Amino acid sequence: DIQMTQSPSFLSASVGDRVTINCKASQNINRYLNWYQQKLGEAPKLLIYNANSLQTGIPSRFSGSGSGTDFTLTISSLQPEDVATYFCLQHNSWPRTFGGGTKLELK
Amino acid sequence: EVQLVESGGSLVQPGGSLKLSCVASGFTFSNYWMDWVRQTPGKSLEWIGEINTDGSKTNYAPSIKDRFTISRDNAKSTLYLQMSNVKSDDTAIYYCTRNNRFDYWGQGVMVTVSS
């Protein structure tokens, strides 16, 4: 199985900050990496697919980059509504695997 | 509007069985592969498996293979997850998701395995 190591597991930042979250795959997954936002009590919401494509309706302050084994989700200017847990998902190989999550809170 | 609505979650005893359903609307269900994913109480997400458009092909995570079965009824726009010989580790929220970038997810349904 491909292991997805997500970091940091916890992040505290202020409104307006630039925030970056990383996912590292244990082997090459090309660009088959999605990023999700999950708010308390809700289902995961797709933000970025295939490493750097912004899902329809998602604010442009969210962006993704990377390929191969190293990927980054960036929030260019943190907003209060961005408080959530963020997950990555690799869909290059079976079984699909998720990162452990990053809990983002406001400082 | 794409909607996925799961149902069938409950408290079940270890070794028991349960069948979850996911009713889809807002898109042509028969055109999409569909998946099940679960989230444990510790919040980890685990992919369970997938089914192709006509139900003839499935893939499963090794951790649940031979205990869970995914099926679908395209006439009813419904996806199923048959769970058997359940264990305490199967306690989780179960989500169905559309296998098109894994773009839409249901609200989830809780399954608790306990005696």
Image (tube, coloured by chain):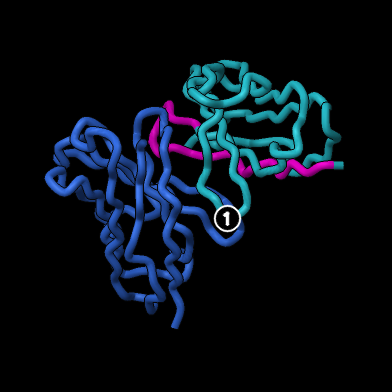
Chain colours: A cyan, B blue
The span picked out in magenta is A90-106
Q: Which residue is drawn at 15% across and 43% down?
A: B74
Measured from the top left, where is residue A67 in percent x and y? Answer: 56, 16
Instruction: Residue type at mark 1: give it.
Output: Gly
Q: Residue at x 35, y 46 (%)?
A: B4
Location of residue B41 (image quadrant): bottom right
Measured from the top left, where is residue B66 in percent x and y? Answer: 27, 56
The residue that disc 1 covers is A41
Left or right, A53 with respect to B60, comes to right
Q: Residues within 10 Å of mark 1 (few under 14, many from 20)?
A: few
Give the letter of the chain under mark 1.
A
Location of residue A73 (image quadrant): top right
In the rendered image of this protein, does residue B36 appear above or below residue B9?
above
Measured from the top left, where is residue A107 in percent x and y? Answer: 87, 42
Q: Between residue A99 and residue B21, name the one nearer to us.
A: B21
Q: Which residue is drawn at 35% across and 52% down?
A: B5
Q: Residue furthest bottom?
A: B115
